[in-house]
Amino acid sequence: LIQRRKMSILTAGTSNWTEGGTHKSSADEAIKKALVINFRRLITLKEKLDIIHEVIRATTIALLGLTVIGNARMLLYDVVFLALNLALCTFHEKKFGALNTDDFSQIVNSVGNDGDDILQHTPTGACTNPNRCLQAMDYSGRRDKGFSFLLVLFFIVLCLGIWTLAFCWWDLDMDAEEYTVFGADEVEHYATLLLVGTVMVYCHLVFEFFTWREFQFSAPLKKDGQPWDVSRDGIPPGRLNSIFGLPCLWFSSPAAYEDLRVWVTLAGPDVAGLSRTYDTQRPLRAVRRVVAEELAFYAMREPSCAAQVRQCLLSAKLYDKRNRIFLKRPLLGEVNAQGRPGVRVTGLRAWGAESRHEDFFQVDLKNGEPPSELGLELVFFDSRTGELIVPNMPGEIVDEGGMDSLRHGSSPKCLRIQNTRCEMVGCTTSAA
């Protein structure tokens, strides 16, 4: 917890009013607290996940053509089997929906920035809270994790059990009618449907593995407590990293991901406007997982989307949507001596601390006290050249592409501007 607060102070996420207009960073500053997108690998993985998705959809449709109604027993088997496969297909469609940016884009364009009406009465007046992308992000709770695990486990056990029965039947003497009440044609029909269903379960397991490994990684800290920099320190330690290489996206430190969980928790899930009772002392449990891949795919659509995501991650202010108050993270050693209202967020992965919660206090906007900002940098990583590239902020004047290439130790004035286009079909860079 102390390390997370130090990181927040280090990245200037708590003390300055910003309008989300201009942010310049060197590579060393940007990587301290960042969401890094390995865009070339992301494009390749998207193609593979699309193939897996199409196989599952085609298999579900094929099951409808394999149904045979020979007797009441076969009718019951077909109905139960189709119901189970449709349930698996529906569950998979929900998982795959995170890769579709159309829904995410519609939500972003439909919602407004939280608390802008409150910020109009601040000394600056023109300050905004660009957190639309956080409101549009999907999430999962602890119940979702348990349900997903049990559902997948149920299908695995079911397939293994029925395959065991099928092999036992095949080992019997086919001419001995006393060994079975099923006919040979009937068992062949059951085995055919089982094979198709097993393919569906296998494809979904592969899909789950890819999404877990490629989208849920946080780089470990180095021995000196500094964030891991892949362009300088190489591939982070870990058996999966040594086998498969760098994932599609990762957070530069565990603290960066924990902060995103806190901001998303307060911005919407299970909190949004359901009550106007100002219960500011309640403990609030953080969401288990935020679907960060939605931000990655949305940022890859076009430079304007990348700029919008970067502005959100850098300048989104800590806002409690239920109580309609802005909050701040106390600095190291700071106490709430004035007894101001606050919110305790529980369920955090407090690495290096005994407690798994964090307290936030309401800010005094009228006296110019700024709320905490997320301060999370958006960085594109080019696996071919090892360059770190950041999109420009909305409104910045650039050439065609809108990306800045960062170099280690360079000051903001020495950044090399790139003419960069980043699309789902590919990404090319050329020096201006």
Image (cartoon, rainbow, N blue to C red):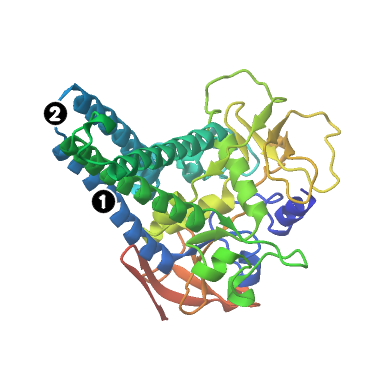
Categorize mark 2 by other alpha carbons within 10 Å: few (<14), some (14-19), many (20+): few
The residue type indicated by label 2 comes to: Ile
Tag 1 secondary structure: helix
What's the CA distance linking mark 1 and mark 2?
Answer: 28 Å
Front in this rendered view, residue 47 or 7: 47
Is there any visible trace of residue 308 in the rendered image? Answer: no
The answer to whether 429 is drawn above or below residue 225 in the figure is: below
Residue 165: % across, % down: 35, 38
Identify the mark at residue 287; answer none if there is no mark.
none
The residue type indicated by label 1 comes to: Glu
Identify which residue is drawn at 14% across, 28% down. 69
Farthest residue toward the bottom?
431
Categorize mark 1 by other alpha carbons within 10 Å: few (<14), some (14-19), many (20+): few
Identify which residue is drawn at 19% across, 22% down. 72
Front in this rendered view, residue 268 or 39: 39
Tag 2 secondary structure: loop
Q: Which quadrant of the figure has residue 329? A: top right
Front in this rendered view, residue 58 or 188: 188
Residue 10: % across, % down: 73, 59
Front in this rendered view, residue 354 or 326: 354
Badge 1 or badge 2: first in the primary sequence: 1
Left or right: 429, with 221 as reference point: left
Residue 330: % across, % down: 77, 43
Q: Which label sits in the foreground, 1 or 2?
A: 2
Identify residue for label 2: 69
Identify which residue is drawn at 82% across, 28% down. 339
Residue 204: % across, % down: 37, 47
Identify which residue is drawn at 24% across, 37% down. 190
Left or right: 397, with 280 as reference point: left
Q: Quadrant of the C terminus?
A: bottom left
Identify residue for label 1: 54
